[in-house]
Each structure stands twice: as C-alpha cells, then as structure tokens.
Amino acid sequence: MKQSFTKEIRAFNRFYTNIIGLLDRHILDSNYSLPEVRILYELYHHSGLTASDIIALLDIDKGYLSRILRRFEKHKLVNKVTSSTDKRSASIKLTAKGNKEFENLDSASNKQIEEVFGNLTESECTALIQKFTEIQQILNNKK
Amino acid sequence: MKQSFTKEIRAFNRFYTNIIGLLDRHILDSNYSLPEVRILYELYHHSGLTASDIIALLDIDKGYLSRILRRFEKHKLVNKVTSSTDKRSASIKLTAKGNKEFENLDSASNKQIEEVFGNLTESECTALIQKFTEIQQILNNKK
DNA sequence: AAATAATAGTTGACAAAGTCAACTATTATT
DNA sequence: AATAATAGTTGACTTTGTCAACTATTATTT
C-alpha cells in the first residue's frame, strides 16, 4: 500500500477517534461503564442471549462479564433463566427497569450526537451520511 | 436533527469503532498502553513539550502523566530539562532510544493498517480516502 | 456404561489504568 | 511582603480488566 494512503487513513483515524471520544463522553456522566453499556445494548437488541453469546459478540472476559451481570441482577436490570436443555447456561433478558435504563442511555447518546453533529445543515448531514454509507460499502465488500 | 440521521451516524460510529479496535490491537502486543503511545506520539511530533502541554493536548490527569513520564525517564526514553525561565516546568524530549521506540510502534501501526485495509484495490483506496477527506472537511467547517 | 474431555459460568487473586486531593517548589499578582 | 496561581509530584484510592482455578453440567471416547 502506498505510504500516502496509510498516512491519510491514520489521519482520519485520529480525527474520528476524537469524535468518538466526544460522543462517549456522556457515558462518564452516567452510572455505567462503556462495557456495561455495550452489554445492555446487546441485551436490548437481542433479548435472551447467554453469557457466552455476549462474550462472542463483545470479546469480553467471562469473569468480568459474570460480575457485571451479577451487578445487573442485583440492581434488577436483568433476569437470568436457566436453560431447560442445558442447565449450565442461562438466557438473559432485560427487566422493564433494564429496558428503561437502556433507553435513557440511548436517548442521552442521541442527544450527544445532536450536540456534536447538530450544527450541520440538512444537506451537509445528508452528504456526510452518504460518505459514511459508502465507506461501509467499500470496507464490507472485502470481508 | 432527523431521527434517521442520528441512527445512521450511530451505525457508522459502531462500525468505525470496531475498525479502530482492530487497529489498536497491535498495541496490546507492545510494551505500551494507549495513553503511553499517544504521549510518545506527541513528543515525537513536537519535541520539547512540557507536561502541561501534554495535558492540554491529550486531556490526561497530571498525576497519571507524571508517573508515566517518570517511567519513561527510568527507561531512558525521555529527557527532561528544567526551563531556565521557569524552574517549575521542564521541556521533555525523546532520547535516541525513545525515538527509535516510537518509530517501531509507528511502523507496527502502519503494518496494522496494511492488514486491515490492504485488501482494497488502489481505486477503492483512493475512493475511501476521498470520503475520509470530505468527512473531515464537512465536520471541520463548523468548528 | 464408565471414564474423560469439553463447556458455561463463578470466584479469588491480582495487575493495570485512572482519579482525586494534598503537597512542594516556583512564579505571578495584589 | 503577602497572597494567589501554576507546574509537577506523591499517596491513597477506585475502577477496570485479566488470569487461572474451580463447580456443575453436558458431550465424547473407549
């Protein structure tokens, strides 16, 4: 690969890492860590995952996950139901409270997007999203 | 902002966070943490920074930084020279060893880029970089 | 069927990363 | 001269994350 390509890619990575940093900032104000939010995200979007599923999805240590889930249970964010066919594993679901909690985080996240990208005009926004989409196409093409 | 915009922006953020995760992976194999690499990066590109400069650039805790710099000094990666005009502050420079160490990290980083983006054709690469540039233009415009 | 291996998840011990406040030395302001 | 501000250090602590040993259960091998 051309050196100039690498350089430009890295410049963009630094640039966008910064933006993601801004966007993640609101998590600091929440009661949750980034991994916790990611776990809630997965459970919200795929109810009934097992711990192993989450590990596969998020590449997270199982001991670490186990403790986070225990905390979630303690705070009534999550219910575990042992599988009838395999008593080692349990399917995990958000409780009503857990759902609500995630939705709060989610809307805080939306608000943060608004704050970082909200100064764009509609046409800029459209253009931006088109680039986003195209980038994903280019990169996914090759998976 | 339209809800669909927010949604697409967030989708891209998840997508690109993943890519950045892949790219940062090589740091795990190095002897340095991400903040350490960022500090070396800044010192490499702006020799003679003070600790306060680095704090301003990277938004890092000064106690944390102080310890990292002490470690760097111990490992002869860095030299501190107390300013003659202000004895509280010191200008920090990479030693020859520090320079080399950063350059190793930097080339590992390039290699990692190669691994993640290397399967693109030249024209895909050109297209990708153009999107990158345009995105930065759109977003910087508004700073 | 019994023995062995593999898997799901938990727990303990620990290491790394990061935060916060108190402190020293020096410089700037009143 | 007194007071406040700044640069950086240090100690105490919390959070985050890792690793390996362990229990219980299920799958595989012999």
Image (tube, coloured by chain):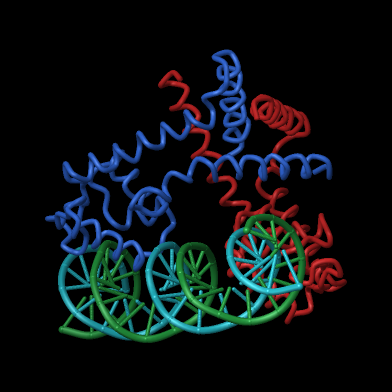
Chain colours: A red, B blue, C cyan, D green
**Farthest residue toward the left?**
B84
When the figure is inspected, residue C21 is found, relative to residue B3, above or below; the finding is: below
Judge by depth and name the residue closer to the eye, A114 or C8: C8
* B42 to the left or right of A45: left
Image location of residue A115, percent across then percent down:
68, 50
Q: Residue at x 83, y 41 (%)?
A: B4
When the figure is inspected, residue A143 is found, relative to residue A68, above or below; the finding is: above
Image location of residue B116, percent across then percent down:
53, 32
Quadrant in which residue B14 is drawn = top right
Judge by depth and name the residue closer to the eye, B57 or B22: B22
Quadrant in which residue C6 is drawn = bottom right
Image location of residue A39, percent across then percent down:
70, 61
Quadrant in which residue A77 is drawn = bottom right
Total number of numbered discs in the rendering: 0
**Farthest residue toward the top?**
B123
Q: Residue at x 48, y 32 (%)?
A: B113
* A71 to the left or right of B143: right
* B86 to the left or right of A102: left
Judge by depth and name the residue closer to the eye, A92 or B143: A92
Q: Quadrant of the N terminus of chain A?
A: top left
Judge by depth and name the residue closer to the eye, B134 or A4: A4
When the figure is inspected, residue A51 is found, relative to residue B75, above or below; the finding is: below
Q: Quadrant of the C terminus of chain A?
A: top right
Image location of residue B61, percent across then percent down:
40, 64
